[in-house]
Image (cartoon, rainbow, N blue to C red):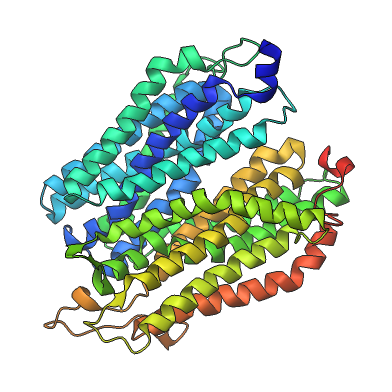
Amino acid sequence: MSQSVVKTGHPKGLYFLFFTEMWERFSYYGMRAIFILFMTKILMIQDADASQIYGSYTGLVYLTPLLGGYLCDKFLGNRRSIVIGGILMAVGQFLMFLSASSGGGDTGISIMWAGLTAIIIGNGFFKPNISTMVGQLYPEGDRRIDSAFTIFYMGINLGAFFSPLVCGSMDFKWGFLAACLGMVVSLVSFVLLQKKYLISEEGKEIGLPVKALDLKAILNIIGSIALIFFMLNFKNMFKSDIEIISYLIYGAMLVMPVVILSDKSLTKLERNRIIVIFILAFFVIFFWGAFEQAGASLTLFADRQTDRMLMGWEMPASYFQSINPLTVILLAPVLTLIWGFLYSRKLEPSSPKKMALGLALVALGYVVIAIAVKGLGLGDKVNMMWLIGLYVIHSIGELCLSPIGLSMVSKLAPLRLSSLMMGTWFLANAAANKFAGTLSALIPPSGEGVDPNVPVVYPSIIGFQITNLYEFFMVFIVMTGISAGILFLLSTWLQNMMQEHHNEFKQDLDAH
């Protein structure tokens, strides 16, 4: 009887990790939903500078898991990494609460830098390790792992759905405190219940420390915290315009392909597949650079030039960020059925074509909002349905690209380089988020952001001045539209490079 449970059910540890991750994502996305509004409204940071800070923060959030994964594998183990990460993130969110409570000024900004540093480093320890433990709950080759990650992914999206609704419905300081409490719930539940639930079906405890934490590992953690704090504060400390974080992230994106492809042990097939991963990672930067405007320029647009009145109640601008996770939860099963239907008829698009479709849908979302703002005056507002439409279309695009990309990397990367290649994929996400901040800084002054006593300075890109929102959104239409077209044209060549003949990898390649 127990054997049938093993075959059809999931271990309780999966739902325990689901609960832990849901509250951690509640904390992260709750803070993210109100972050740029807090900077522009309370700390009085200019839109362009706030956008760059937002990009640096979210970019580093995707970079530090490389460090956290390394220290976990060498010393800490999954459990200890998650506890360290959880403590740092809870402290970081509490510092954001203190920053908001300070009333702004230099004190508030200084506390914000400390809070961001703690959240970034904490995320590096937490994020990669909790996902890894989901796989450790199951025997090697167990077919339930795919459905387990689907369930786990729902936890991420549930947390991301509720957090903007909660954190965005109150003053900034209480919003940050709510995010802090979410992290505390995640951390305390993990510490108290880990021994009971984090057990494999063979009865072995999973995620234990590899070896004792030595002085070298401790110095690595302290040094990393100091380095992140220095990079975040570099412009402020030295009154410099140099974007040191950009150099770090974009530099790493250029160096990694050279380092990995110079490995002489790679076979021709392995080399070709790795080249495909790097090419697709390049296009992913344009996708997420446009998609991640959700927490930056699109939040400013929602706040200033979107009519948010519903029967006498003004909906908080942060609420729009709940549309994406809700759409993913509702439509992910539908898209899975569509891919299955097309596969059964040998019509399923290849992975590169699906990703090109994702880029095209992001462009379409911006076409929708560009239509809405064409001819819009500085004080005018658009109906919220236009912005909701953009988010729904973008979410469908995410479903076409994000899970497909992760699955493709896991299948194409040589086993001995799988962790490194996945880290490189997330490095592309780091570059994309930093790029998103740079693009968000191009949003022209509009609505409440315009001070009549100050001369208006319009941003420009490659010599083209952006004087209104229509021109701003056209940047994303052109960027993602051209990227989608090029990727679609390259898709057959990429498909041949990775030896994907119909829709799925052949069984012998799958086992590689």
Number of marks in the rendered image: 0
**Viewer-proximal residue, 485 or 340?**
340
Examine the rendering and report whether any part of residue 226 can be seen.
Answer: no
Q: Is 46 situated above or below 321?
A: below
**Viewer-proximal residue, 349 or 483?**
349
On screen, residue 19 versus residue 467, left or right, reads: right
Residue at x 40%, y 25% (from the top left corner)? 83
On screen, residue 242 versus residue 169, left or right, reads: right
Query: Which of the image's four quarters has the N terminus?
Result: top right
Q: Quadrant of residue 183?
A: top left
Task: List x then y, in percent, for residue 438.
Answer: 41, 67
Q: Is 299 situated above or below 14?
A: below
For the view shown, which residue lies furthest in the bottom direction?
375
On screen, residue 443 versus residue 346, left or right, reads: left
Task: List x then y, in percent, for residue 235.
Answer: 31, 59
Q: Quadrant of residue 86?
A: top left
Q: Is 22 situated above or below 339?
A: above
Residue at x 61%, y 16% (from the top left corner)? 200
**Viewer-proximal residue, 124 or 205?**
205
Residue at x 89%, y 41% (from the top left corner)? 508
Task: List x then y, in percent, for residue 234.
Answer: 32, 54
**Viewer-proximal residue, 432 or 241?**
432
Q: Quadrant of residue 302?
A: bottom left
Examine the rendering and report whether any part of residue 397 can be seen.
Answer: yes
Task: List x then y, in percent, for residue 240.
Answer: 31, 64
On screen, residue 141 versus residue 269, left or right, reads: left
Query: Which of the image's four quarters has the C terminus?
Result: top right
